[in-house]
Image (cartoon, rainbow, N blue to C red):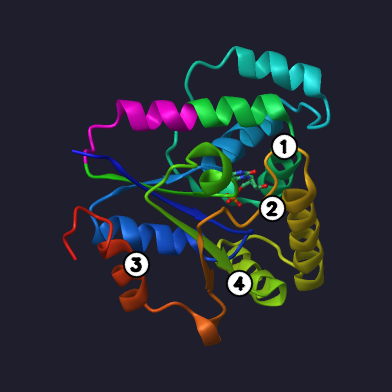
């Protein structure tokens, strides 16, 4: 049976993770959050007190890692880890490593139905031949408000203007970096996930149902 791959790309705080989880549950697919890999590397860098701009040390560190876990963990969601992840995601050797890890995870998985993978370059670079590609977008102010609330709920200190500034900076980095910038992948369905125009579950299921084994 053909493995279905659904890619969901979009900027920080667009809600792509939530949509990915919903799609995975509905269609019995496995959810892979590619950002976790960048966050895990950022976490190791932070623990080892390596300066994220020190490419040589990070390269040595990565060369020593065989496999990195795709397990989610609350500690990977802090603002500090987000900022380090955003810096190292610019390095080509880090991106190559993460892309290999994603492919390895899929190869080793026993799930035969397929995967829904979310990130920044999944439909444009990593899985260009995916069955369905979605690109989720939301106004930056709404994203910053959501992120602010998320941090407060997690018990972290959060100052809204600072969060807005951080998100704008991360957006700029994501969209302007030389290696795999955040773009709308060719052939992607663009979804505005701001509350007013949010895609309905029904619309999403119609799009996906057409592809998944003709079940819809
Ligand atoms: O989606 P996220 O916020 O968990 O991603 C964490 C960081 O990793 C973010 O700075 C963007 C980067 N990232 C990326 O460059 N490419 C991906 N496919 C996924 C994440």
Mark with earlier residue (1, 4): 4
Q: Nearer the viewer, residue 112 or 206?
A: 206
Write down the residue under mark 3: 207
Write down the residue under mark 4: 146
Task: Give the magenta part as a residue range.
Answer: 101-112
Rendered location of residue 87, percent (x, y): 76, 40
Mark with earlier residue (3, 2): 2
From this view, report whether residue 144 is shown above or below residue 2: below
Mark with earlier residue (3, 1): 1
Write down the residue under mark 1: 179
Residue 63 lies in magenta, yes or no?
no
At mark 2, the secondary structure is: helix
At mark 4, the secondary structure is: helix
**Looking at mark 2, is its residue's CB closer than 8 Å to ligand 1?**
no
**Looking at mark 3, is its residue's CB closer than 8 Å to ligand 1?**
no
The mark lying in front, picked from 4 and 2, is: 4
- Residues at circles 3 and 2 in contact by the CB criterion of under 8 Å: no
Crowd tier of the residue under label 3, counting other residues whose Cα lies within 10 Å: few below 14, some 14–19, many 20 or above: some
Instruction: Identify the residue shown where x is 60% and y is 40%.
Output: 39
Rendered location of residue 43, percent (x, y): 63, 35
- Residues at circles 2 and 1 in contact by the CB criterion of under 8 Å: no
Residue 107 lies in magenta, yes or no?
yes
The answer for how far apart the CA atoms under marks 4 and 2 are is 13 Å
The answer for how far apart the CA atoms under marks 4 and 3 are is 27 Å
- Give residue 79's mark: 2
The answer for how far apart the CA atoms under marks 3 and 2 are is 34 Å
């Amino acid at each position: 049976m053909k493995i279905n791959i659904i890619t969901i790309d979009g900027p920080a705080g667009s809600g792509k993770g939530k949509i990915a989880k919903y799609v995975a549950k509905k269609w019995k697919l496995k959810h892979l959050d590619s950002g976790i890999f960048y966050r895990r590397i950022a976490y190791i860098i932070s623990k080892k007190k390596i300066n994220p701009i020190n490419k040589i040390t990070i390269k040595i560190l990565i060369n020593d890692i065989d496999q990195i876990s795709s397990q989610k963990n609350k500690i990977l969601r802090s603002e500090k880890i987000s900022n380090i992840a955003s810096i190292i995601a610019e390095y080509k050797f880090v991106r190559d490593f993460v892309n290999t890890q994603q492919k390895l995870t899929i190869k080793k998985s026993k799930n035969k139905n397929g995967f829904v993978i979310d990130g920044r370059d999944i439909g444009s670079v990593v899985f260009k031949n995916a069955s369905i590609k979605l690109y989720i977008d939301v106004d930056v102010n709404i994203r910053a408000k959501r992120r602010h609330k998320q941090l407060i709920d997690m018990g972290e200190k959060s100052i809204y203007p600072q969060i807005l500034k951080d998100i704008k900076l991360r957006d700029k980095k994501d969209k302007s970096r030389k290696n795999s910038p955040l773009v709308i992948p060719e052939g992607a369905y663009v979804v505005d996930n701001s509350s007013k125009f949010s895609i309905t579950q029904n619309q999403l299921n119609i799009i996906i149902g057409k592809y998944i084994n003709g079940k819809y």
